[in-house]
Amino acid sequence: MPIISAPRMLVEGRLTGPTQLTVENGIITSVGEGDAADIVLGHGLVTPGLIDLQINGSYGVDFVDAGPDEWLTVACRLPETGVTAFQPTFITAPIERLLVGMKQASAAFPQLAASAGSARPLGVHLEGPFLSPHQAGVHDVTFMHPATASDLDALLAPGVVDVISMMTLAPELPGALDAVRRLRAEGIIVSLGHSDARGSEVAAAVEAGARMVTHIFNAQRGLGHREPGVAGQALADPRLTVGLIADLHHVAAEICIVVMQAARGRVALVTDAVASAGMPPGSYELGGQQIRIEPGEGLARRSDGTIAGSSLSLDAAVRNLVGIGVAAADVLDAATRVPADVLGRTDLGRLAAGAKADLVWWSDDLRPLRVWIDGRVAYDGTSVPA
């Protein structure tokens, strides 16, 4: 039953003074002040493990086509970036290809759960194909279309539906509101994105059960002073969690600050990372399309110059926002508690009795030093006794 102490911990959305926590059988049993500890971390801070709700791949792997070894490669390397749980994301593709990808994911997930040091998968995030071709981004418009009953039947079939945790769709498309209701009835979180919807159409989808907006300001109708669009409605509606890619390329630093202030406590940092993340410049694949990252540029692009996801890591997103002046506690909350809450995972993303002991020890300049998953060390970049 190790007791861990640190000069600061992220507890209930704020950074405390000296604090210690107790772990038993992979679960946090207490958090508070104390005198003696088994593991004394003399500097830095401890937070819950980071949670990435939108990651298409990393380390040369595109999740939709990944085999068992590739899944394991990514899941075992994510803790290097402080990530202890992730929602693998498949972008727009034919339904048949998505079904194959989900079958492969379903086979891989138990192996990841049994592997020491592996970040935990939280289910597949389907970002498409029920999206607007007017806001396609890098997605292939050939495969975008409104939701049909037959498509939903295929995706919600036994053996498939349990793999899906989230779906991004465009609420203005025909049949979208019925799809939202049906998905929510199956326990799937609905996010709104790749959408040219007006604010009123977003509001209707929220009434139907949508609870998130995918990568705010990217591939969606922006904020106008007379028409809020997707972005404005996301900032205004307290029921919506707001996904934000904080690489300072997808969204300018000044707008990141606006988002963090306007939607404080409900911003979820995401990477939208693709296979090029953690890799050298070169050519990679995203959902069947060729993308490339050039030397000296942190963005992957399609051959026509369209931005294709990011090469961002979630710990770098944290440093980016703190570096532009956002309070560290708010930023760390956006990478831990907020994404856990949108999925209804009260056992993740918090330092509290009863939560899983998924922890990150950070340096004072916010670099992950050690990461625990279920109370076991998953990454250690230090020589300090564990």
Image: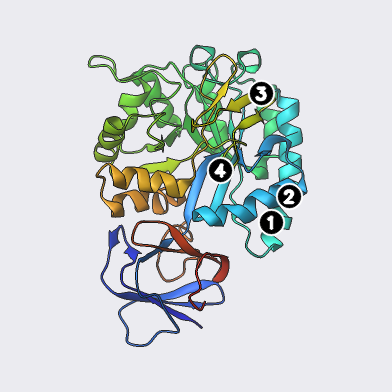
Labels 1 & 2 near each other (Cβ < 8 A) = yes
Q: Nearer the viewer, residue 238 or 127?
A: 127
How many residues crowd mark 3 within 10 Å: few (<14), some (14–19), many (20+)?
Answer: some
Q: Which residue is mark 2?
A: 108
Circle nearer the viewer, 4 or 2 = 2
Report the residue at 31% width, 68% height from top: 8
Give the Cα distance between marks 1 and 3.
28 Å
Report the residue at 71% width, 44% height from top: 105
Residue 173, compared with residue 292, is above or below; it is above
Which sits earlier in the primary sequence, circle 4 or circle 2? 2
Element type where label 3 sits in the image: strand
Circle nearer the viewer, 3 or 2 = 3
Labels 3 & 4 near each other (Cβ < 8 A) = no
Q: Which residue is mark 4?
A: 187
Give the Cα distance between marks 4 and 2.
22 Å
Q: Which residue is mark 1?
A: 112
Give the Cα distance between marks 1 and 4.
23 Å
Q: Amino acid at mark 2?
A: Ala
